Image (cartoon, helix red, strand yellow):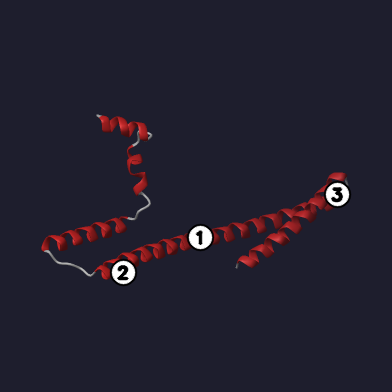
Amino acid sequence: MAYARHYELTTSGLNFDRFVDQFDEPTLNKMRQQYWTAKQLIRKKLGKKEDEHLLASDAEFDTKLALFRFVQETSDQMLCCIDNYQHYLSELVQVEFELSKMLKDDGGAEMTAAGRVMVAVARVLALSVHHSYFALLKLS
């Protein structure tokens, strides 16, 4: 009962909150850690000894490998984000260009102050399209 009270006090009451700190670890890393622990326990029970330097280098290598995989995964995610950004930016450039063209055409046809404002907005929008297009080219 004391555990349940502690659990209710430290979480939102939802079951998945119990394991939030473990979501960051991939299942494969957990399995490797359990395998390593079991292997060491069996070696100890059988009385076999391992070289201390071998153990230290294995642990260091495992740490570096886990870090490399994390960096690789993060880099892949960043590349996907950049691809999405380029796609949406190119769509934005196309839409802004069409809008500036429409405003220029419609503003030129109208001889009132509203027409002059539409032409001015079309020019500013065309400049914005120009800058966005060059930003898109630099990303490619």
Tell me, yes or no, whether the two marked residues, 1 and 3, touch with CB atoms within 8 Å.
Answer: no
Which callout, 2 or 3, points to the residue nearer the camera?
A: 2
What amino acid type should be assigned to the residue bearing mark 3? Arg
Q: Which quarter of the figure has residue 47?
A: bottom left
Q: Is residue 98 left or right of residue 111?
A: left
What amino acid type should be assigned to the residue bearing mark 2? Ser
Element type at marker 2? helix
* First along the sequence among labels 2 and 1: 2
Element type at marker 3? helix
What mark, if any, has residue 57 been given in the picture? 2
Q: CA distance from mark 2 to mark 3?
A: 74 Å
Relative to 125, say whether 56 is above or below: below
Q: Quadrant of the N terminus?
A: top left
Q: Residue 61: where, in percent of width, then height?
A: 34, 68
Q: CA distance from mark 2 to mark 1?
A: 31 Å
Which callout, 2 or 1, points to the residue nearer the camera?
A: 2
Q: Quadrant of the C terminus?
A: bottom right
Residue where numbered disc 3 is placed:
116
* First along the sequence among labels 1 and 3: 1
* Callout 2 crowding tier (Cα within 10 Å): few <14, some 14–19, many ≥20: few
Q: Is residue 20 left or right of residue 85?
A: left
Residue where numbered disc 1 is placed:
78
Q: Is residue 137 left or right of residue 69?
A: right
Q: Which quarter of the figure has residue 11?
A: top left
Q: Nearer the viewer, residue 121 or 1?
A: 1
Q: Which quarter of the figure has residue 6?
A: top left
Picture residue at 38% right of the left edge, 52% below the top: 24
Relative to 64, say whether 13 is above or below: above
Q: Nearer the viewer, residue 35 or 104?
A: 35
Q: Residue 124: where, in percent of width, then height?
A: 78, 54
